[in-house]
Amino acid sequence: MLPRDVTTASEPIMNVPGSVHERLVRHLEAAGASFRQIHHEPTPTSADAARVRGEPIGCGAKALLLKTGEQFRLFVLPADRKLDSALVKRQLGVDRCALPPRRSFWR
């Protein structure tokens, strides 16, 4: 089963001004979440990010922007896990779950 949406901050994150990073940090702080930030060079894979952090890969998370049906959704999961797209499709009642084409990001 997919986790349910949980929002504890008073305002939806997409309505908060600032960069994505700034909005995410403010949202986590408003929700009282415990987190730390590590600044490092870009890492193309979860394994690279774990290496830079000096931690096992399972300590991190990866974010996947997917097109499910006609909607874009962000999935965040442990870095050492794979997304079960068949489960996502069943749970959301859609027939498609895939990485969007690169050109979709620039519309």
Image (tube, helix red, strand yellow):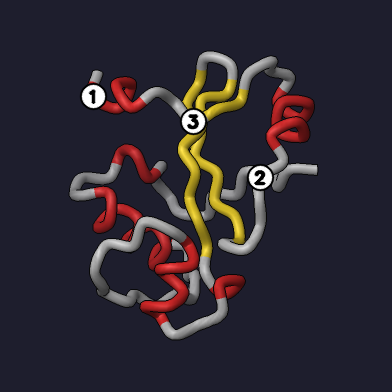
Q: Which mark is residue 106?
A: 1
Residue hosting label 3:
99
Q: Quadrant of the C terminus?
A: top left
The percent position of residue 8, horizontal first and vertical second, equals: 53, 54
Horizontal side of 14 relative to 91 (left or right) equals: left
Mark 1 vs 2, N-terminal side: 2
- Which residue sits at x=41%, y=69%? 49
Residue hosting label 2:
83
The percent position of residue 5, horizontal first and vertical second, equals: 62, 43
Q: Amino acid at mark 3?
A: Leu
The percent position of residue 73, horizontal first and vertical second, equals: 51, 33
Horizontal side of 33 relative to 43 (left or right) equals: right
The percent position of residue 25, horizontal first and vertical second, equals: 33, 62
Q: Is residue 65 above or below residue 25?
A: above
Contact (Cβ within 8 Å) of mark 1 with mark 3: no
Q: Amino acid at mark 1?
A: Trp
Horizontal side of 30 relative to 68 (left or right) equals: left
Horizontal side of 86 relative to 15 (left or right) equals: right
Q: Element under label 3?
A: loop
Mark 1 vs 3, N-terminal side: 3
| Residue that lies at the very extreme toward the bottom in this rendered image | 54
Q: Nearer the viewer, residue 29 or 106?
A: 106
| Residue that lies at the very extreme toward the left in this rendered image | 18
